[in-house]
C-alpha cells in the first residue's frame, strides 16, 4: 500500500545521489555505522507484526483552523507543531491535542515574514526561517508571541536547535543563487545561540547539490537525520552538540545517478527516470530506537520500509489487509512514529473497507469534518 507517497515531487530531479555514502565528496572519512540493503517489498515480513499499538490523537480546533498542507511536523514536550508552507502558517497544539495558536504573520514588519522556509523548536522558543527577507524570527513557544529576529547566516534549507543551545543549519543550495559570505561550501553549519556560524560539516567537493527543498533534517531519539530525495543514505548527527555520529547507507538494486540526467531538460529527465525504474530514497529517513523508517521510490509510487537494527530485518505494509496500516510517518519522538492524517471522509471510508483501524468517535468525527488527527505508532521492543 502506498499512502502519502503517491506523488513523487519533480524536485527529485534536482537531487544528489549520495549523502550517506562515505565515498561521496564531503563524507570521506566519516564512519559508516550501518548499511541497509533494499531489494523490494516482502509480503511475508509485515509491519503489523512489529507494531505494538496504533493510537489516534485528535487535534481539537483543526476543523476551525484547517491544516491544508503538511510540510513539516516537529514534536517536543510543549506539543505538536505543524508547518503549512503553502499558506505560511505554523499550527501549534498541546501534547493532549488542544489547539494553542497559529503563527500567521505574512508581511514585512517586526515578527512578520515573507515565507516560512523551515522552522525549529526548543522547550522555550519557536524559530521560523525567512530566506527572502534573510531573517530568522524567534517566538515564545507557549503562546506564539514574537521575541526578536536574527539575520540568516546562510540560505537555510533546514534548522534544528541543539540541546546545548546551538543550532544545526543545512544549506539550501538553489541553483544560480548567491550564498552569503558565511557559506564556505558545506552542506551543514553549526551556529551558536545567536545564529553566528562557528563551524561547518560535510563540505562539497564537486559543486553544490542541486536541491530546492524546504527541509533536509528530521529528529530522532538523541540524533538528527540529514538526507534528501535521491540520496543513497543519510548522516546521523548528535542532537546534543551536532557532532557527526556516522553515515547510514541505503543501497538498492538500481540507484539513481544524477550524472545521467544533468544535461537533460525536465520532461526528458522525467521520462528517463520512469523508463529506467530507478529506486532511491524519496524522504529523509526517521531513525528512532531500534527502528529506521524510510521510503524508496518503486515505479510511480513510494514503498514504506521499517528496518529493525537489532535483527537486520525489513518490514512492509500489506497490499490487501489495512489493519494497523503503517502510513509513512512525518516525525519520530520518544521512540514513537507520528503521522498526520487529514485525508477526509471518503479516503477514510475507502481504507476502512480494506480493514484499516476504525478511529474512536471523536477522531472519526474530526476526520469526517475535514479536520486533522495524529496517528501515533508504538513499535515492539
Image (cartoon, helix red, strand yellow):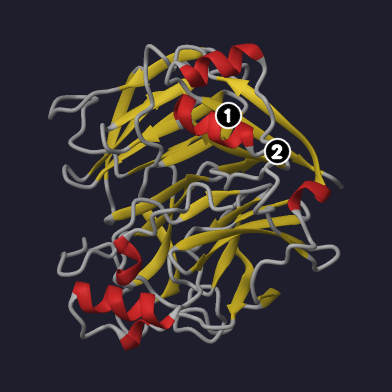
The residue drawn where x is 61% and y is 75% is: 249
The residue drawn where x is 58% and y is 18% is: 364
Residue 354 in picture, x, y percent from top left:
64, 39
* Whether residue 94 can be seen here: yes
The residue drawn where x is 27% and y is 78% is: 269
- State left or right for residue 79 relative to residue 92: right
Compared with 51, 149 (above or below) is: above
Compared with 12, 84 (above or below) is: above
**Residue 64's quadrant in the figure?**
top left
Compared with 39, 80 (above or below) is: above
The residue drawn where x is 65% and y is 78% is: 31
Residue 1 in picture, x, y percent from top left:
59, 52
Q: CA distance from mark 1 to mark 2?
A: 10 Å
Compared with 24, 283 (above or below) is: above
- State left or right for residue 262 relative to residue 67: left
Residue 36 in picture, x, y percent from top left:
68, 73
- State left or right for residue 378 relative to residue 293: right
Image mark count:
2
Question: Which residue is denoted by mark 1 in the rendering?
Answer: 374
Amino acid at each position: 500500500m502506498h499512502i502519502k507517497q503517491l506523488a513523487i515531487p519533480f524536485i527529485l530531479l534536482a537531487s544528489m545521489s549520495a549523502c550517506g555514502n562515505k565515498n561521496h565528496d564531503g563524507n570521506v572519512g566519516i564512519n559508516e555505522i550501518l548499511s541497509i540493503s533494499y531489494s523490494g517489498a516482502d509480503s511475508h515480513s509485515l509491519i503489523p507484526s512489529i507494531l505494538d499499538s496504533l493510537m489516534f490523537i485528535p487535534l481539537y480546533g483543526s476543523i476551525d483552523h484547517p491544516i491544508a498542507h503538511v510540510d513539516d511536523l516537529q514534536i517536543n514536550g510543549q506539543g505538536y507543531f505543524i508547518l503549512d508552507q503553502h499558506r505560511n502558517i505554523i499550527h501549534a497544539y498541546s501534547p493532549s491535542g488542544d489547539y494553542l495558536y497559529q503563527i500567521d504573520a505574512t508581511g514585512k514588519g517586526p515578527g512578520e515574514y515573507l515565507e516560512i522556509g523551515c522552522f525549529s523548536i526548543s522547550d522555550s522558543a519557536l524559530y521560523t526561517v525567512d530566506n527572502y527577507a534573510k531573517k530568522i524570527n524567534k517566538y515564545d513557544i507557549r503562546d506564539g508571541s514574537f521575541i526578536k529576529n536574527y539575520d540568516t547566516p546562510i540560505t537555510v534549507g533546514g534548522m534544528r536547535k541543539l540541546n546545548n543551545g546551538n543550532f544545526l543549519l543545512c544549506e539550501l543550495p538553489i541553483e544560480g543563487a548567491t550564498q552569503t559570505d558565511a557559506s564556505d561550501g558545506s552542506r551543514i553549519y553549526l551556529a551558536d545561540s545567536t545564529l553566528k556560524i562557528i563551524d561547518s560539516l560535510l563540505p562539497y567537493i564537486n559543486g553544490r547539490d542541486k536541491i530546492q527543498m524546504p527541509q533536509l533534517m528530521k529528529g530522532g531519539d538523541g540524533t538528527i537525520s540529514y538526507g534528501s530525495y535521491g540520496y543513497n543514505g543519510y548522516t546521523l548527527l548528535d542532537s546534543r552538540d551536532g557532532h557527526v555520529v556516522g553515515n547510514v547507507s541505503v543501497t538498492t538494486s538500481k540507484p539513481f545517478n544524477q550524472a545521467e540526467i544533468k544535461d537533460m531538460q525536465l520532461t526528458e529527465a522525467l521520462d528517463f527516470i520512469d523508463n529506467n525504474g530507478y529506486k532511491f530514497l524519496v524522504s529523509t529517513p526517521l531513525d528512532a530506537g531500534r527502528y529506521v523508517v524510510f521510503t524508496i521510490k518503486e515505479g510511480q509510487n513510494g514503498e514504506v520500509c521499517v528496518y529493525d537494527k537489532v535483527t537486520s530485518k525489513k518490514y512492509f505494509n500489506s497490499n490487501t489487509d489495512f489493519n494497523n496500516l503503517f502510513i509513512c510517518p512525518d516525525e519520530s519522538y520518544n521512540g514513537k512514529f507520528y503521522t498526520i492524517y487529514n485525508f477526509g471522509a471518503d479516503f477514510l471510508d475507502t481504507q476502512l473497507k480494506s480493514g484499516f483501524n476504525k478511529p474512536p468517535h471523536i477522531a472519526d468525527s474530526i476526520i469526517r469534518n475535514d479536520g486533522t488527527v495524529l496517528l501515533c505508532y508504538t513499535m515492539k521492543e
